[in-house]
Image (cartoon, rainbow, N blue to C red):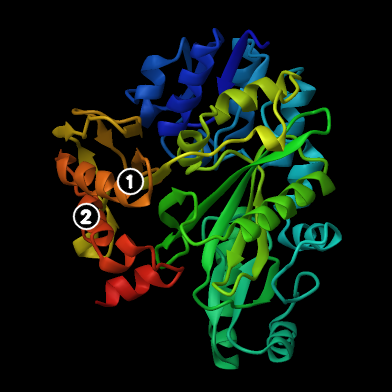
Amino acid sequence: MFDRVLIANRGEIACRVIRACRQMGIETVAIYSKADKDSRHVQIADRAFCVGEATNLDSYLNLANVLTAIEITGANAVHPGFGYFSENARFAEEVGRMGAKFIGPPVSAIEAMGDKAKAKKAAIGADCPVVPGSDGPVDTESHALKTAQEIGYPVLLKAVAGGGGRGIRRVDSPDDIQKLWKLCQSEAQASFGNDEMLVEKCVVNPRHVEIQVLGDEHGNVVHIGERECSIQNLRHQKIVEEAPCAVLEMETRAAMGDAAVRVAKAVGYANAGTVEFLYENDGHFYFLEMNTRIQVEHPVTELVSGLDLVQWQIRIAAGEKLPFSQADVNLQGHAIEARITAQDPDNDFAPSTGKITTWNPPGFGGVRLDTHVYAGFTVSPFYDPMIAKLVVNGKDRPSAVRLLQVALDEFHVEGIKTNIPFLRRLCAHPDYVSGQVDTGFVPRFLSE
């Protein structure tokens, strides 16, 4: 087992990884920017190393500085969390060259799944259903127009690299392609350093269902059930996630899980990863992408499975075999996660910054809070607005929904604006309560 793990991230996921390491008796090293010097992840780590100024490019995405931190602190393993360098093949390679272990999948798997065109090809090779679309990147606007005409509108312009809803636009006509082509390319280039685009059929208002997989370095891969992630904002960024999906039949659940395992094995996957699907209520599902990292929403899977996924990431990276088979995975109850963000819902969700003067989260049975903030903490304008994840666990979906509603009602924050009032209204909506949701739910809700 590793002696010292450096967490190449910030915020609540850094805190989450630090606590997992400390429970395993592993020393931890936090990195931080000057703007984050008072963040909780800096306070709870055994050691902390400043990697630069406030902006991401000057600190958390400063490759030379992060690698220097690994060298100076003598960390023999690096956990990237999510975002930042978590799906960066070069970073994983550099960590390996330094003699440290990257706590994540092999570089070959990162490369295979980091390019959506290659990922789609791998899924086809694994006999996994895929969304109809271009065979590879479309290199010109005229090529995109021709491909869209062949597929039939509506289609999606989608960046080959990255995720998080960036570089993706729905297109309903040739005029839309002419308006949005350069916008998507520039957004993709700015976000991922790659402006290549795919054109795919737009599956209108499906459910977004993803499968959590775990694979060890000895060829064993299992799935840990599915998560429903259909509650997304207008930029396709997830807001509320839950496990399991309320509408999946057992047969479909098994087929989707088997497909995810086949995709993971096809690229030699090891460690934690997520295979994402679009699901139609007629039972059809299509491969969307694979995220080669821990997900923001991993806590809901932990609560229904009883597995600590972050600890298993570390154990797998240390060479341990999975001690359980697919038949041993036992899922119970229902869990829901709501992302708490520093945003003003009444001002088009504009970021809200400043000092948190009051921080009173709910604290009762069945509630988990993953966060890095506290009363007196200053939310800066430099980072993602997510400040906490509120997670509840009930014996079934109705009880979990009610727990979430009560927890949101008791969550009191002052000093900054948050999306909590918006989440209260959303989670009280009859369609959400009954589970009648899809990826078009939030736009419909906002229009109301």
On the image, the x and y values in percent for residue 36 come to 37, 29
Across and down, in percent, residue 7 comes to 54, 24
Q: Nearer the viewer, residue 251 or 342?
A: 251
Q: Quadrant of residue 53?
A: top left
Q: Choose between 194 and 255: the one closer to the eye.
A: 255
Q: Position of residue 345 (x, y in %)?
A: 23, 60
Residue position for label 2: 424
**Considering only order in the chain, which callout, 1 or 2, is on the residue closer to the N terminus?**
1
Residue 144 visible in the picture: yes
Question: Residue at point 73% right, 51% down?
Answer: 258
How far is disc 2 from disc 1 in space, using C-alphas? 14 Å
Q: Position of residue 102 (x, y in %)?
A: 70, 27
The residue located at (32%, 23%) in the rendering is: 38
Amino acid beneath label 2: Arg
Q: Which quarter of the rendering shows the C terminus?
A: bottom left
How many circles with numbers are drawn on the protein? 2
Circle 2 — which element? helix
In the rendered structure, the answer to whether residue 239 lies left or right of residue 172 reads left
The residue identified by callout 1 is 400
**What is the residue that sits farthest to the right in this orientation?**
125
Of circles 2 and 1, the one toward us is: 1
Kindly identify the amino acid type of the residue bearing the numbered disc 1. Ala
